[in-house]
Amino acid sequence: MKGISRVLIANRGEIAVRIIRACSEMGIYSVLAVSEADQDSLAARMADRTVCIGPAHPAGSYLKVETIIAAALGAGADAIHPGYGFLAEQPSLPDACAKYDLVFVGPKAASIRKMGDKLVAREMARAVGIPVIPGSRLIGDPIEAGRMAEKIGYPVLLKATAGGGGKGMKIARGHGELKTLFDEASAEARNAFGDERLYMEHFIPNARHIEVQIFGDALAISCTCLSGIVPSSVDIRKWSRRRPPQPWILNSGTTSARRRSTSPVIFSMKMPGRLNSFWIRIRTDSIFWR
């Protein structure tokens, strides 16, 4: 993989601030792509350079692949960092980066197609015997949502297939509110991710869970992640080089994972692709793939 000296950051707010700080620690020049509404933000003041990419509404700025690519090329960037949300889980951005010889700081497009779509991820989990929360296929309209909800059982959780960060998620506790919530979730998903598709899961109230973030890069394909501890980018780079290899189970051909019985907070994961980052949610009383 070619070296990185200048990164275009295609995000805003706290996400952008954290990436800019990591770039500063690593001696990488940061170029922040900003909408008209974010030109005076904290992130814009922290970045080495800013490039305005369009109007305040994300559909005209942060969600436009061609605009992000043009901004990166115009700024002389080696790489694009999407943060999370917006285009981070859209395979069209890494595809475009590959076309223009830019490094995409994220998974390969093939990995995003498998894991960025929650319905595909659920099927992959089922294929290796991991239980999943009872749910539906892709839902086309509120009428179909009503049929699926009756089958699954209320309360149900409407979820964006391309979602993340709680966006595009609505809890429906009865049929009377389902249509309104379906429309709201669909609109929210479209505005946040450029993808309005929804599916449904049975809602589990008061569930307890552990979230584990999985990291890998072009040099260390496999990695171990600590629950509740997300080290800085510099720590990950140093740590991944000294961490001894770990054994794997749950090998599906695309993903391998193992929990170490001697340490309940340490998990191991192996994924194809570079610079991967995915979430697994693990309930304490049962294990489900999220």
Image: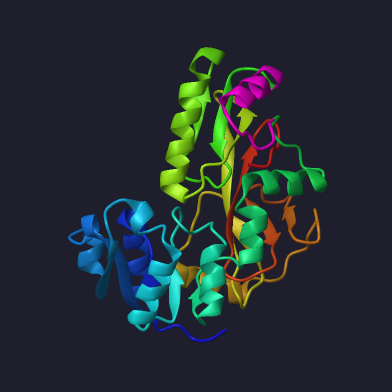
Q: Is 142 positioned to the left or the right of 28 in the image?
A: right
Q: In which quarter of the image is residue 14?
A: bottom left
State which quarter of the image contains the N terminus. bottom right
The quarter holding residue 206 reads top right
Residue 248 is covered by the magenta coloring: no
Q: Which of 83 and 233 is in front in this view?
A: 83
Residue at x-position 57% and y-position 62% = 91
Which residue: 38% across, 65% down?
A: 19
Q: Which colour scheme is used?
A: rainbow
Residue 166 lies, in percent from the top left, at 47, 39
| Residue at image point 40% right, 84% down | 5
In this view, 279 is above or below 285: below
Query: Which quadrant of the figure contains the C terminus?
Result: top right
- Whole-percent x and y of residue 173? 53, 17
User: Magenta residues?
Assistant: 135-151
Q: In this view, does 76 lie to the left or right of 141?
A: left
* Magenta segment includes 150: yes
Query: Residue 75 vs residue 179: left or right?
Result: left
Residue 27 visible, this angle? no
Instruction: Give percent across and percent down for residue 25.
Output: 36, 74
Q: Which residue lies furthest to the left in this view?
A: 40
Q: Provide residue 37's location: percent of width, then percent of height.
A: 22, 55
Quick one: 202 or 72, which is closer to the camera? 72
Would you identify the image quadrant in which residue 75 lies? bottom left
Task: Identify the residue shown where x is 75% and y is 49%.
Answer: 124
Instruction: Name the side, left or right, on which 259 lies relative to 240.
Output: right
